[in-house]
Image: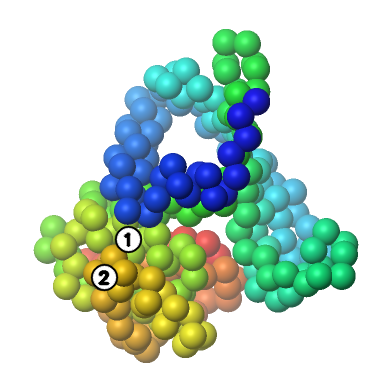
Amino acid sequence: MLILTRKEVEKLIPPKEIKKVIDVVEKAFFDYGRGEVQMPSKLYLNFKKFNGDLRIMPSFSETLEMTGTKLVNVHPGNSHLHRAFGGQEKIRLETVMAVIILNDPKTGLPLALMDGTYITALRTGGGGAVAAKYLAKKEAKSLGVVGAGVQALFQILAISKVRKLKEIAIYDIREEAIKSLGKILAKEKIRIKKGKLKEVCQKDILVTVTPTRKPIIKSQWILPGTHINAIGG
């Protein structure tokens, strides 16, 4: 069985290749709409004591003749330090982490086990781009993003490939997160600016990428015709 680490997956699909990811995600949506994909509802294991959950997500593509299952967690508290594997060393874990296993549907043979954290980030970015491509108004030129974490990066990279954006505004309670995101995007020649929450919400396209479970955006802030990609909590 082929085993691919996160570094190996990132080398195979670098962020600059996200347009290819968007095309693949769009084709997957198309196949699903034609009834050529089996994708039952995800199964949840809730860990209320630990403020997190584990999601099991199987699917089968008749077109690709491939089946896969993703196991992905969501633990908002992972921004704090945790002991690594029960040892003494403390590490800061990501909120979302995943693994993916691929099987041959003809025999059930496990073909590959790969890190799914990066793939999840790419796929979610691709999904947001497909939505903005088809559902946002044709003249959409501005993007507002609430949350400056990992997924904000991939949403901006992906949507920038399907829309000619003249303005990208970001809000996050952590100013250092916005600065870090800005440095990464600058390498891709994408400029962002910090904005107040209400201001960020008043753009042609609004993306929310935050694990908060409390309402933070007011309906009266949203302008007519705004397209919203509501991701996460």
Q: How far apart are marks 1 and 2 (CA)?
A: 8 Å
Crowd around label 2: few <14 · some 14–19 · many ≥20 (10 Å): some
Type of amino acid at the residue the image marks with label 2: Ile
Local secondary structure at mark 1 = helix
Of 221 and 86, the residue lying toward us: 86
* Residue 222 vertical position relative to residue 55 in the rendered view, above or below: below
- Residue at mark 2: 190
Q: From the viewer's perspective, is 84 left or right of 74? A: right
Q: Earlier in the sequence, mark 1 or mark 2?
A: 1
Placement of 43 over or under 229, stated as above or below: above
Q: Residue 104 or 223: which is nearer the viewer? A: 104
Furthest residue in direction top, as rendered: 106
* Residue name at image x 52 percent, y 76 percent: 215
Q: Which of 53 and 106 is in front in this view?
A: 106
Q: Look at 37% across and 61% down and name the residue there.
A: 155
* Element type at mark 2: loop
The residue type indicated by label 1 comes to: Leu
Residue 46 position, x and y percent, is 75, 54
Asked whether disc 1 touches disc 2, contact meaning CB atoms under 8 Å apart, the reply is: yes
Residue at the disc numbered 1: 157
Residue 53 visible at all:
yes
